Image: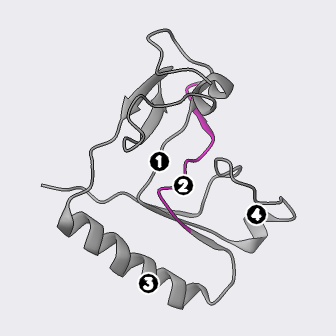
Amino acid sequence: MTLISSKSLTLPEFLSLTAPDGDITYELVDGEAIPKMSPKFFHSRLTLALSSILDRWNQGRGEVGIEWAIILSKNDRDWCPVPDLLYISPERLGDIPLTDEACPVPPELVIEIISP
């Protein structure tokens, strides 16, 4: 594994990076590893509340994820956003096994909390 790079990254290169500071979450945007803002108290509490609501609604059908990276492409370029919350139905997920990797399919619901 390598530290954050200044060159344009491919998706596999991005997913194998090691952040210099383990507390920072990065997203892949236009070939660059972009740090996300660190959540504050209100953001953290709102994430917890929304996650609880989604879990109750979900009732074990599909997957609810918190800060789970998603493998996508935008304008024919790799893109790996890390939303605050996401939901994927069992129909969309199909038989894809979930491992400790980025989300392999686009979710039906993505929530990004915008902090002031």
What residue range appears in magenta?
A: 65-75
Which residue type does callout 2 highlight? Trp
Q: Are marks 2 and 1 in contact (CB under 8 Å)?
A: yes
Res 25 quadrant in image: top left
Crowding near pointer 4: few (<14 within 10 Å), some, many (20+)?
Answer: some
Which residue type does callout 1 highlight? Val
Residue found 60% across the figure and 59% down from its top: 107
- For marks 3 and 4, give the one nearer the viewer: 3
- Describe the element under mark 3 as helix, strand or loop: helix
Left or right of 7? Residue 35 is left
Write down the residue under mark 4. Answer: 93
Label 3 or label 2, whichever comes before in sequence order: 3
Spatial separation of the CA atoms under disc 3 and disc 2? 16 Å
Left or right of 91? Residue 54 is left
Name the colouring of the figure. one colour
- Which residue is at the far left? 116
Write down the residue under mark 2. Answer: 68
Q: Do the residues labelled 3 and 2 touch (CB within 8 Å)?
A: no
Residue found 68% across the figure and 48% down from its top: 101
Write down the residue under mark 3. Answer: 52
Label 2 or label 1, whichever comes before in sequence order: 2
Crowding near pointer 3: few (<14 within 10 Å), some, many (20+)?
Answer: few
Spatial separation of the CA atoms under disc 1 and disc 3? 19 Å
Spatial separation of the CA atoms under disc 2 and disc 4? 15 Å
